[in-house]
Image (tube, coloured by chain):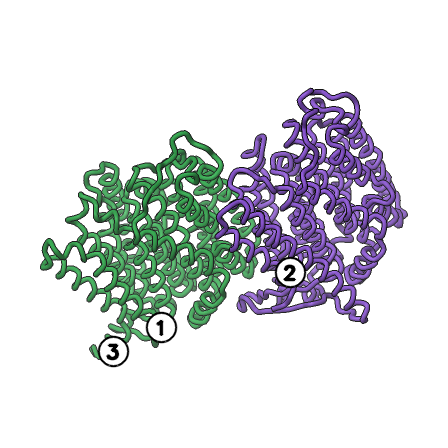
Amino acid sequence: MNFLSLFVAIPLLMMIALFFAKSRKQIQITAVIGSSALLILGGVLAYLYLHERALGNTAEMLFTADTIWYAPFNIHYSVGVDGVSVAMLMLSVIIVFTGVFASWKIDPLPKEFFLWFCLLSIGVFGFFISIDLFTMFMFYEVALIPMYLLIGVWGSGKKEYAAMKLTLMLMGASAFLLLGILGIYFYSGATTMNLVEISKLHIPLQAQYFLFPLTFLGFGVLGALFPFHTWSPDGHASAPTAVSMLHAGVLMKLGGYGAFRVAIYLMPQAAHELAWIFLILTGISVVYGAFSAVVQTDLKYINAYSSVSHCGMVLFAILMLNQTAMTGAVLQMLSHGLMTALFFALIGMIYGRTHTRLITEMGGLMKVFPFLGVAYVIAGLASLGLPGLSGFVAEMTIFVGSFQHTDVFHRVLTIAATASIVITAVYILRVVGKILYGKTEHADHLTDPDARWYERIAVVTLIVAIVALGSAPLWMSNMIHDSLAPVIAQLMK
Amino acid sequence: MNYSNLIPIMNDELSLLLVMVILLVFDILGGEKSRKIFQPVAFVLFGIHTVLNACPREAGELFGGMYQYLPVMTYVKTILNIGVLIIFLQANHWLKSENNKIKTGEFYFLLLTTLLGMYFMIASGNFLLFFLGIETASIPMATLVAFDKFNRKSAEAGAKYILSAVFASGISLFGISLIYGATGTLYFSDIATLAAVTPLQMLAFVFFAVGLFFKISLVPFHLWTADVYEGAPTNITSYLSVISKGAAVFVLFTLFVKVFANLIDQWQSILYGIAIVTITIANIFAIRQKNLKRFLAFSSISQAGYILLGVIAGTSIGLTSLIYFVLVYLFSNLAAFGVIGIIEQRTGKVEINDYNGLYQTNPRLSFVMMLALFSLAGIPPFAGFFSKFFIFSAAIQQQYYVLVFIALLNTIISLYYYLIVIKAMFLTNSETPIEKINTDLPARISLVVCMLGIVFIGLFSYIYEQISVLASALF
């Protein structure tokens, strides 16, 4: 068995172990062991990958393995990674690891919660390691359905509505996707569903014209593409902490990753022709998301709309169709994944103490729980792009890439997107100022304890990752940059 | 007439007949004491019949082409047999109840009679035998639907079923007689060459097809379905929705693709329209249902609509996907009906609202129900996802993009209503949830089998490939 399959096997084993777990203690131990194993595996993978590349292996996908699954449809279980998948896998292991600690005291039904949580991570990991269209699509859907129960059972607020809306919208998107994938397979005349193999074939331009929008839209909905982003604020606001983290941190990245790995990589001509439509939509996502965040008063909604804006930036950068901007897009996925996870973790912890998420109800919390307060400030600064933290690296790369387009259309959109940074600063600083400083709104907040050890683990891990990516981004961005070369070569054809 | 080759070719029907006769004699002569062991005996006998006939044999025909055997039919019949075995397990508890104790023998005999009818339907090479098969399958069915004779709804459902079934057969028979008038033959092999697009033949074909559409309950011939499904005892409902339908769709495929091959442009456009209305209308109606049995009735109508995509594709992949779809659908639907049956027979509750908070009291039953619904909705990694994917692929391969797109949009609608039930079980809390239910062993075994089917059939490609080998032999 290829070692990449371990990414799917470990959560599977976790599920089996959880199934037999008797007490909360056993559940926690299983979850910690499993997620730590994944974390280590992520590190090992990055090391092996870089090592292999340093040895001069220039294959497009490394560590590939291929098993025939459904021969009549040429469906294989084939795995392989390039720099982008490695980056995404590393992000996912970090989020899963911290997610476990963020849901340490989950109540009720901890066992079921972690079972679904593991299924969700199987979907996520499976998606990133697959290079077969069918397997990829399958894992994509595996990741979606646990969300319904995770939000519906353990969520808060109007959770049933949010869960249903999220599931139906994302599954609706996957209907487009399925049609797109089948179309790609049959129009390319491929004898395999392997992505790399299909990329060598030519899909007729007429077919590309309808397959590209189908696939891009299918993935775009998950990446919060305007006007199909509406599931995201409700979903994130109602989901329990760890699920918000995993969903905004990783699941939304499935959208961005898929959009370029399937839509742009396989249908480059249509991407050139039709990018402008989606550029406008993503431009709206970026600006509209930021403005919406300004007017929200619920912490989770603020962060959810901020996610719409930041994930819009990912798709925006991908559609710039050049190597620099796309590198920026992947960096932005990493950066946004980490900081939004940190945000949601902190919001969950703050909510657990103050029992409110309304910023009008909170104030002066920095002196009550300084650890969480400082962490929140760091997350905020990363979000608005302070140099030294991850957000800066990503956004800088994106805008440098976008500015390489010299025509008016791209310039206008780029400037509009750049303006969103200012708006980001408005809502981040406003929230920080209101809830952390100033005078305390409720006297009973004063007695709230600071972060517990398990919360500290989650928060510190994420902060370390954010700072690491922000201060030493070069190895990561080089790895991504090199891996994007085949995509760019496709676009140049 | 040479009877020496009767055994290898007609094995299925003969051994089923043998099982039926043994059971009948055993029931009549066995007396009071035998009642206790009647059910296990029936199960074991039928199990032996299933196992003995599970291997495909040489193709052949009998009675001058009246009866045909093709290896792929073995798989279809085996799938039906497995379904019947599961239904036997699920019906075990229900048949022990006070009202049904004395009718156990009848239940088995009638059920197996309808199965025999379906065997003949599948294996017929002539419209006469086909019609005999369809009638043998329908008339005892009405008795079974009205099996709960003290239940007004069940009796009413029986009457509804027999009236509409007879009406549909009448129309079908009229179609068959027109076919005879137009071509001068009733043999499938002859009609395949003689069929032509003439007004008379089209008329004949449409009349004939309507009877079959009724059997599969495609819109607009579905009006009997919800009432009958609701009124019939749950185990019979599951039999109707799975076995009866499974046999009919296979026959639909072979008849349309093989016998009416010359009319392919005509029937493809007919089916195209029917598939779209069936899926859409059934889905829209399913959303509004409060009663779980009616709800599953509409859900199974829409599933039949998806199956039509395989027929429309008309290729060997289409046939394979169709048989595979029936297999997966069988496990999913029987699991769902199994749970509903267990709960209904013990508490009498069948409304979706009654299921509120079921997870608190009966986690296992709600878990099985959830798997079944996910599989029906086509969620991976459950088998339903694979069967839907394959049937859509078969249609896409023949360039039916719009049709598949409509079907895909409908899967979203269907996901919505399946989630409503899951929501009731898992999300909604109830003051008065259904109390904890002790399931009897046979039913539990049946649910485990269904669960294994739902989880593993999709993950292992062996089954699909086996069906594929024999199905492609047809083309």
Residue B42 lies, with reference to residue A161, above or below; the image says below
Q: CA distance from mark 2 to mark 1?
A: 37 Å
Q: Pick whichever of labels 1 and 3 is earlier in the sequence.
A: 3
Residue B103 lies, with reference to residue B79, above or below; the image says above
Q: Nearer the viewer, residue A488 or A371?
A: A371
Are both tags, 2 and 1, on one chain?
no
Q: Position of residue A136 (x, y in %)?
A: 62, 57
Q: Which residue is mark 1?
A: B56
Say which chain tag 3 marks. Answer: B
Q: Which residue is mark 3?
A: B5
Report the amino acid beneath label 3. Answer: Asn
Circle 1 sits in a helix, a strand or a loop, which is it? loop
Residue A231 lies, with reference to residue A146, above or below; the image says above
Q: Nearer the viewer, mark 3 or mark 2?
A: 2
Are both tags, 3 and 2, on one chain?
no
Q: Which chain is green?
A: B
Circle 3 sits in a helix, a strand or a loop, which is it? loop
Report the amino acid beneath label 1. Answer: Pro
Q: CA distance from mark 3 to mark 2?
A: 53 Å
Q: Which residue is mark 2?
A: A130
Q: Nearer the viewer, mark 2 or mark 1?
A: 2
Circle 2 sits in a helix, a strand or a loop, which is it? loop
Please indicate, yes or no, whether residue B346 appears anywhere in the rendered image. Answer: yes
Q: CA distance from mark 1 to mark 3?
A: 16 Å
Label 3 packing within 10 angstroms: few (<14), some (14-19), many (20+): few
Q: Position of residue A182 (x, y in %)?
A: 60, 58
